[in-house]
Structures are given as structure tokens and as C-alpha cells.
Amino acid sequence: MPTSSLYTTRAVLFDLDGTLLDTAPDMVRALDLLLQEEGVPTVEHEKARQQVSHGAGALVTLGFGETQTERDHKRRCQRYLSLYEENLCVDTDLFEGMAETLKFLEDQDILWGVVTNKPAFLTEPLMKALNLDKRSSTIISGDSLPQRKPHPQPLFHAANECDVLTTECIYVGDAERDIVAGNRAGMITLLASYGYIDAGDQPERWGANGIIEHTHEILDWLTKADELELDIQKAN
């Protein structure tokens, strides 16, 4: 529990894929392997990268198209997850500047954690492989609770595990469901534009409190969060 921070923000929570970690190299590689197994041409890396935040189902649909049967789609998703699990952390790493951002938060006694829709059997070993599991104050996976984003309950649960109010949290994500969940939970929400956003998306319409282009901009919002809190107090 933070005790000496100069900021009103007491916890910063992150989505995993496309926000905290650049998992695209390993997730796209698993899709390539699956496509190769079935004799299907691989997909352009950048197109696949844009779908990473949406998980296995979206990647399989991208690779095999909308016309595949439900049975084939399910089978391919299961095989995809097996291939991905076998090569979970080959080229995955923190986004540029994130290591310094996390260290700053820790130095300021501000907790940080992860709220993701990625299943726990992938999330937990990935965090452990990067030596982040012990540093993170909470890790909520897509199957940790009955609800998952865009439902706000995972964020409520994460705040509870950190022993902070949701209004004392910033949530950073790269998908619309992240912003919707964070807003519903009463958190300050930041859209990570450096993440896996589809070319056809309109993130400026998702309702985030701010859009950041680099991880270090998260730190700027620690001060902005203080200003927002003062504005709210004055309004009341």
C-alpha cells in the first residue's frame, strides 16, 4: 500500500497486450505457424499486429477468413493457443520506456498492476518470465472473474486488491473495451495509441480522458490527475 506518494493517484493499472507488453511478435508468429500448418498464406505482419489486442479469435478470423465454419474456427483457436503457449516469451518485452515508467511509479510508492482479457494460463507465466509478477500488485486475467472487460468488475476487483479507490486509479489500455471498462469503474482512462489499434478504428471517439503516444506520457498524467481531482472538488 503506497504511503508517501506526492500524487493523488495511488495505482496505475495496465492492459497487457499492446499496452504494458509488446506481445505482437510472439502472437503473430503463432498465427504464422498455424497458417503454415494448414497451407494457407501468412498475413502481413502489420495487419496481424492490429488484431493482437482482440485475441486468438480475431487473429484466426484474420488468417482464415469469415467463411470458416464455427467448428473449424474453434479448432484453429485451440491449436493457435497451443502454438502460442509453446513460444510465449521469445521476443515479447516491455514497450519502449515502460521499464523506466514502472520504476518511477515504484519509487513514488504508486502501485501498478495488470487487468487483461488474456487467460490466466498465458498471463501468469508471461509475467513471471519477464520478472514482473512479484512487482505487480494485482494481476487480473480474462478468466479470473465471471466478468471481463468491457465490464468494469475486473477493474473494481483490481482496485480492491490494491486497497485503493477506483477514483485513485489510472487505467491504460489500447482497445475500446479498456476505455469503456475504465470509465464505468470511475477511473481516469488513457488510450495507448502506440498499441495495437486497427487502421479503421476511431480511438478519439472512445471517451478516454487522454490519448498517449509514448509510455512516458503516463507520468505526465499523474499531475493531470491531481488537477482533475481539484476541479471535481471545486465543482462539488
Image (tube, grey):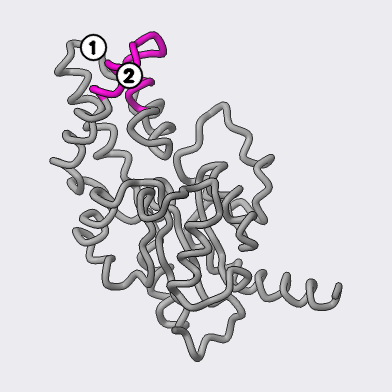
Which residue was labeled with disc 1? 40
What are the residue bounds of the magenta stretch?
59-76
User: Could you say which quadrant of the image residue 100 lies in?
Assistant: bottom left
Going by the image, does 200 lie left or right of 124?
right
The image quadrant of residue 99 is bottom left
Query: Going by the image, does 79 lie left or right of 101?
Result: left
Residue closest to the eye, 48 or 233: 233
Q: Is residue 31 magenta?
A: no
Position of 110 compared to 182: left or right?
Answer: left
* Residue name at image x 29 percent, y 52 percent: 120
* Inter-mark Cα distance, 1 to 2: 8 Å
Q: Residue furthest front?
A: 146
* Residue nearest the viewer, comparing 67 with 46: 67
Q: Is residue 34 above or below residue 221?
A: above
Which label's residue is closer to the chain start, 1 or 2? 1
- For disc 2, the marked residue is 63
Q: Are marks 1 and 2 in contact (CB under 8 Å)?
A: yes
Disc 2 element: helix
Q: Position of residue 62 (x, y in %)?
A: 38, 21
Identify the image quadrant of residue 65: top left
